[in-house]
Every structure is written in C-alpha cells, then in structure tokens.
Amino acid sequence: MPRFVVEADGGSRGNPGPAGYGAVVLDPASGETLAERAEYIGVATNNVAEYKGLIAGLTAARDLASDAEVLVRMDSKLVVEQMSGRWKIKHPDMKPLAAEAARILPRAQVTYEWIPRERNKHADRLANEAMDAGKRGEQWEPSASSAVFAAPPAPSGPPGDAAAGAAAARAALAAARGGTDAGAARGIAGADTLFGAPTAGPVAADAGAGALLAVPGAADQGRTSATATPTAAPAGGQGWGPDMGAPATFVLLRHGETALTPQKRFSGSGGSDPELSPAGRRQAAAVAEALAARGTVQTVISSPLLRCRETARAVADRLGLDVTVEQGLREVDFGAWEGLTFAEVQERFPDDLQAWLDSPKAAPTGGGESFAAATRRISATRDRLLAAHAGRTVLLVTHVTPVKILVRLALGAPPESLFRMELSAASLSAVAYYADGNASVRLLNDTAHLR
C-alpha cells in the first residue's frame, strides 16, 4: 500500500478576507514533493481556507493512489481535532467541508496529526503564493518541482528483500508521524545544530570565559548531534497540542573574549568585570554581521557586565536597535575563585571545589552563588522576559552559566548536564518557547569564523 504525507494550510488576510489554501503531498521516506495544490478562493475565513486546503491535499493524494495510507499534518488544531472525531463540528460553514473531506478517502486510510506552524512552512508558502496571485488577478501555477507519483518497481531480490522494504516503508511512515522526530519538529530558524562533546576528565574551568567542566567519567565519546527536544510530551500525547501560534525565541549570544578567556580563568559577576579584548571586539563585530544578515532579531537585551554590554552594543548598532540591560542575565558570582584557573582552585580549595562539582546547591568559596540559586534567578528572568516578548525574537547577550541553564531547562536535562556542555566565546544558541510549556533548542558552537 502506498504511503503519503499530506501537509495543508489555509489563510485569510482579514478573517474573513482575501483567502487561499496550499497543500503538498510528500513521500514519507524521501521527503520528495509528489504534488502541490494551491488556490485563491476569494473572501473567506481562516477555517474555511484550512478545510479547503485539507480537501485539496486529500484529493491530490487520492489521485496519486486511491488505496494510499495518508498521514495529514496541519497546524490547525480545529481541523485536526474535528476530522479526528474528538471535537464536534458546530459551525454551519464547517460541516459540509468536513463531510466533503471525509468522503475523499476511507476513514481507515487517513490519520491526522497537529504540528506547529514552523513545521508547516511548505503548505503555508503555497497558500500565500495563491493569495498573492489572487491579489494580482492571476491563478496560482504549480512549481516545476511538483512530481508525478510512480509506484516503485517490484523487488527483484529474494522474498526477504520485499519484507525489508515493507518494514522500511512502515518505519518511514512512523518517522513521518513524529515517532523519531518529535523534538526536531520544533526546529528554529536559527543557527546550525552543532554540539561539541566535552573533553574527558576534569578540565580547566572558565565558567565565565570559556571551557566548561567535564566531570570524570561523564564525557561522551565523539560528537553529539543536538536536536530540538521538548521538555515534556505535548498535551494529549501522540503529538497533539493546542494551536499555539508563534513561539518566543531567545537567541543566546555568549559575549566575546576578554583577556581572561584564553587563560581559562573563572570570571563571574564578583570579579574585575573585564572589557572585551581586541579578539573579543572582532568576534562581536563578526557576529553582528551574521545576525544582521539573518535579519530576525527584534530586541537586544544584555547582562549588566561590561563584556556583555560591549558585545550587545556592537550587535545593536549594526541592527539599528537599542540595548536593554537585564540584571538577571549576569554571570554567577564565583566568590574567592574569581580570576583563578581550575587548577588553582583545586589546589587552594579542594574540598569546596569537590562539593561544587557534586551538588548544584554548593556555592563557591567565600559566598559565591550556587548553580541552584542561579537557576532560580535565571528561571525568573526567563519567565519575565517571555511574558514581555511573546511571539518575538530576542537576542540575549549573556554568559556561559545563564546560557547553559536556559538550555538545560529547555531540554529537561539534569543539573549535572551543566558540566557536559562546552560554550565558546561569541557562540550562538537559540531556544524557542511555546505556549504549552514546551521548548526546543538549536546550537551553534563554532566561533572559528568569528576570529
């Protein structure tokens, strides 16, 4: 039995207003586009346009193979829940559309899944192309990339090959349903997903300026690919969740180098507050150009420490934005360890250091801030900023520990994971926060191009 993924969307510029829909049929194994449909439908509501997109997508799938098993993915919670039979259809305009969609293929052949808008970009683009064409008084034309489905040739090998192929097809459909991509579903339009594994064994600590600690025996081998991972399963299971809209995205920029960075010294909020070094200023200028080219940052917020404010100012000047200082983004106070290397702390304060490595509640010698206390501070700061910047992309210029904590919380990772990350100077990360409490992470931890 052929298997397809249908992604559909609809939109109205006014709700009701000029409306259109888009739908795409995909091969779940290869991701290849098999068919595209889009149409301007005149004045209508968003929901009508979304149903029209569903009808067009199912029709295209049926035209390719009437016996196909189809996974429908849409970012409309209303359509998904109504077509799945969990919500009643009360609006008189929706009832005939839902009935029409249900008649296209047998119910047993169709499965519905809600996805965030960020995963429905192909259908959304087609819907907007159709609306744009309608505005010009034209009809939407399919792109040259739309393919005609052809059934795969029968296997020529032994029977085992056919069984393996069927199993692979089932696995591909399961992957398309989110079984192996529940985290990557919430990818961010941000940096590349690179995550460098730490060096085995204790390394020189530079919690404010460079290398993160690696606990003995805790280091992973090789490189780990970081995918966007939600902190909890979406409400309702099976990938279901509310129609949440655009997330708030925090682009996390660690400040550029200071004189302490290459020396790998603790540099927190209780030390000398160093300025950027010449290398750090070059990094700040380079990352400013990179963010300007991306063009997504709408607000710049900085830690109060000088190295962050200088980095933030370089970016904000390039973007034409102001810098807001947020006290909650400051680095941890490392107490008596400020300015020391990891080896020097290990020599002078071995018991305190071991306690710090063993428990997030332990504070550095001399009244420093524990990771547990920093987590409470940074969590409160995160929540306050999320409330103030819903649906926006905000650059947070901060330090190693705040970035690590924000990433850890987004991933739902345990406190000891703070010692298993490496964060280079002027490196970028991003966290998208959704209305249901889930979050996803994307990392870029390579600053070679910024030097």
Image (cartoon, grey):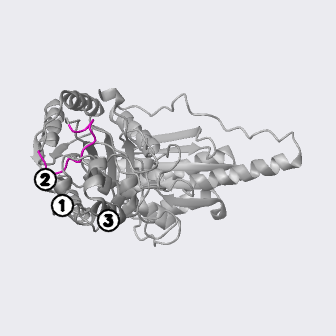
Q: Which residue lies furthest to the right in this view?
A: 158
Q: Are marks 2 and 3 in contact (CB under 8 Å)?
A: no
Mark 2: few/some/many CA within 10 Å (<14, 14-19, 20+): some
Per the image, the residue denoted by label 2 is 270
Secondary structure type for disc 2:
loop
Stretch in magenta: 260-272
Q: Quadrant of the C terminus?
A: top left
Q: In which quarter of the image is residue 110?
A: bottom right
* Residue 273 seen by the camera: yes
Q: Do the residues labelled 1 and 3 touch (CB within 8 Å)?
A: no
- Compared with residue 78, is residue 445 higher up or lower down, i.e. above or below? above
Of badges 2 and 3, nearer the viewer stands 3
Residue 13: horizontal and vertical position, in percent? Answer: 30, 46
Label at residue 368: 1
Residue 265 on the magenta span: yes
Q: What residue type is labelled 2?
A: Gly
Residue 53: within the magenta?
no
Majority secondary structure of magenta residues: loop
Asked if the residue under mark 2 is in contact with the one under mark 1, i.e. CB atoms within 8 Å, the reply is yes
Q: Which of marks 1 and 3 is nearer the N terminus?
A: 3
Quarter of the image for residue 449 reads top left
The foreground one among 206 and 153 is 206
Query: 10 Å neighbourhood of mark 1: few (<14), some, or many (≥20)?
Result: some
Residue at x 16%, y 62% (from the top left corner) = 366
Distance between the alpha carbons at the discs numbered 1 and 2: 8 Å
Which sits earlier in the primary sequence, circle 1 or circle 2?
2
Q: Which of marks 2 and 3 is nearer the N terminus?
A: 2
